[in-house]
């Protein structure tokens, strides 16, 4: 019989301890973000997928199609093409595809670009049930932004 009362007292004590903790945090301000109406502000060091940086004068990508980002990518998720156009010095970027399904966000592509043509985007809310939605045409995305 004495074991029964010990358990009853112990259970009541732990109940009041739990209610005390709940009451303490109940009075603190809410930190939950109401997701669809509010958005998280990304930190400066956030790594989203890569994106091309436009030239300030022309609005075209700074990329000169050297291929160092493609060679430096351990995931082999970058494919790019360029062509030599008449009257233009060097190659012109015609295709830049990023397969984000295999990208590991390691940053080798951004580090290996000596011309400052790549950076990490601030896109964080990427969700889709289709794999095709994560294969990005970065030239098209750059034109849509500007």
Image (cartoon, rainbow, N blue to C red):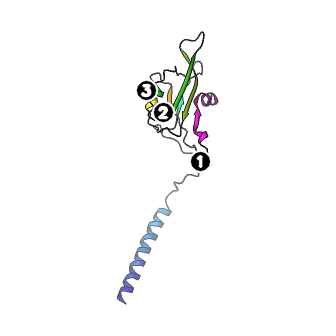
Q: Which residue in the rendered view is the most extreme toward the bottom?
A: 1
Q: Does the magenta segment cover residue 2? A: no
Looking at the image, do the residues carrying marks 2 and 3 touch, with CB atoms under 8 Å apart? no
Residue at image point 53% right, 40% down = 101
Quarter residue 132 falls in: top right
Residue that carries the numbered disc 2 in the rendered image = 76
- Occupied quadrant, residue 89: top right
Across and down, in percent, residue 53 comes to 54, 26
Pick whichever of labels 1 and 2 is earlier in the sequence. 1
Tag 3 residue: 112
Residue 110 is tagged as none
Distance of label 1 from label 2 (alpha carbons): 36 Å
Would you place residue 25 above or below residue 12 in this image?
above
Is residue 68 or residue 16 the one in the foreground? Answer: 68
Q: Secondary structure at mark 3?
A: helix
- Give the residue number, with chain letter if any, for mark 1: 38
- Numbered disc in front, either 2 or 3: 2
1 and 2 marks in contact (CB < 8 Å): no
- Tell me the magenta residue range: 128-146
Question: Which residue appears at 51% of the width and 34% of the height?
Answer: 77
Name the magenta segment's main secondary structure: helix
The residue sitting at the left extreme is: 2
Give the tally of numbered discs.
3
Residue plotted at (60% across, 28% down):
142
Q: Is residue 55 visible?
A: no
Q: Residue at x 47, y 62 (%)?
A: 25
Of callouts 2 and 3, the N-terminal one = 2
Task: Where is residue 17? Give x, y as percent.
Answer: 41, 71
Q: Nearer the viewer, mark 1 or mark 2?
A: 2
Q: CA distance from mark 2 to mark 3?
A: 14 Å
């Amino acid at each position: 019989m004495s074991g029964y009362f010990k358990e009853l007292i112990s259970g009541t004590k732990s109940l009041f301890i739990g209610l005390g903790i709940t009451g303490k945090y109940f009075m603190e301000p809410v930190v939950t973000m109401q997701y669809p109406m509010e958005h998280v502000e990304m930190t400066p060091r956030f790594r989203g997928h890569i994106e091309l940086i436009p030239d300030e004068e022309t609005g075209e990508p700074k990329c000169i199609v050297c291929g160092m980002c493609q060679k430096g990518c351990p995931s082999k998720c970058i494919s790019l093409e360029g062509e030599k156009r008449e009257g233009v010095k060097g190659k012109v970027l015609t295709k830049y595809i990023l397969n984000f399904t295999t990208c590991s966000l390691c940053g080798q592509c951004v580090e290996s670009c000596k011309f400052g043509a790549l950076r990490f985007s601030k896109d964080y809310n990427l969700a889709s049930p289709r794999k095709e939605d994560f294969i990005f045409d970065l030239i098209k995305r750059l034109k849509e932004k500007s």
